[in-house]
Amino acid sequence: MIRAECRTPSQLIQAHLQERGWTQRVLALILDVNEQVVSRILNGSKSIDAELALKLKTILGIDPQHLLQLQQEYELAKAQIELQFDPGLSTRATLFGELPVTDMIKRGWFRGITDVRDENLEPAMCQFFGEKSIKDIEIFPHAAKKSSMFDGVPPAQLAWLYRVRQMALDLPAAKYSPSAMTTALGKLKPLLISPEGARKVPRIMMEAGVRFVIVEALPSSKIDGVCFWLDDRHPVIGMSLRFDRIDNFWFVLRHEIEHVMREHGRSRAMLDADLEGARAGVGDELPDEERVANEAAANFCVPRAKLTSFIARKSPMFAERDIRGFAATLDVHPGIIAGQLQHETGRYDLFRNHLAKVRSIVTPNAFVDGWGDVAPIGA
């Protein structure tokens, strides 16, 4: 009966003392300790350990396992009450458990912050995300209910998107118009013939009114590109150059340009992650916006009818002279043919010698963050 009614170790001990008519002084004498020690046991300020539990079994007949279980439950309940006075605990768990904060610090995205223990980290994070409070950052469930262009985006990708947005806000550009974008496409097409043509892309995008930025992807984010609008007149294209290949560069760029031309991304960012394989195709499983962007990108690189004809004539053996000859007839680099052949045949192990690198060519003329450089935002 005593056992069922008691909820703490001290209650259980006091109940047994009352049953015997003992005072705390009697228990102190039996235990051979100061009476103050017994007082602390009975008011709960001294924990019951295994040795004391065994002594109390001998003295009062209390089950030591039950006594230690009560002690554990009591300490857990007390800790839960104490944690209520640290409301930031769950906030910090969400921030540091979901956002790649350490990588963001390494990349210099929080001005003046070099360590996760810096007391100014939270204000710096609020500034980065443009929020007054940490809890308003979109990774928190209640914050995601507000209308946002980036709702539902995984945390690592969200951080990358905000860096793109930061940089785009700092970047001047001409007034955008559909006709300017059409003119830009005409300027871009001849550049496919060599890797060096990529260096002209940032200027052509700026002249067309598109804010074009390059941000190195965060680990495991798999982002390739994004299209969104700062407002009704200012489209943004962000690229990660995750794959340093001429074919991937032109495919992703043209994909994002199609989003801009069709005014996709006005209300919600068109985030393109892992834009390879089936995700770069035109299958029914893809959203309409992605399917039309993929089709436009593929046709820009290599007209589909001509590619289909080439594959039908040369498959399964694609000689080097055939790839180079086909590229020459289209005025494109052989690496662009190689990339489309890899996609169509699924043989990503072939034609790799043609996949020229372009990152070192395009980045010197672009607004870039990554690969050791930090974009000077608001400087």
Image (cartoon, rainbow, N blue to C red):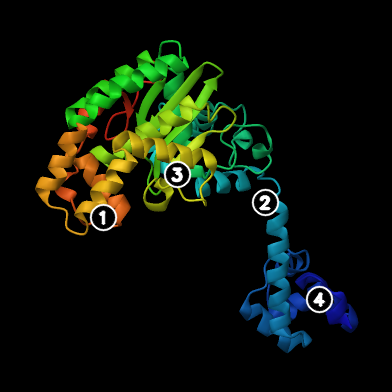
Marks 1 and 2: CB-CB under 8 Å? no
Q: Secondary structure at mark 3?
A: loop
Residue 83 is labelled as: 2
Mark 4–mark 1 Cα distance, whole angstroms, equals: 72 Å
Q: Quickly name the residue at label 4.
A: 12
Are there few (<14), some (14-19), or many (20+) residues within 10 Å of tag 2? few
| Residue 114 vertical placement versus 14 (above, below) | above
**Residue 217 image offset from top left, x and y in percent:** 37, 40
Counting residues from the N terminus, which is met first, the one under dot 2 or under dot 3? Answer: 2
The residue type indicated by label 2 comes to Leu
Q: Is residue 37 left or right of residue 328?
A: right
- Of labels 4 and 1, earlier in sequence is 4
Tell which tag, 1 or 3, sits nearer the viewer.
Answer: 1
Q: Please state the horizontal and vertical placement of residue 105, each as a whole percent of the image.
A: 40, 36
Dot in front, 4 or 2: 2
Q: Residue furthest left?
A: 321
Q: Amino acid at mark 4?
A: Leu
Residue behind mark 3: 100
Residue at x 67%, y 44% (from the top left corner): 87
Location of residue 154 with respect to 216 vertically, above or below = below
Query: Which residue is pictured at 83% across the width and 81% down the height?
Result: 3
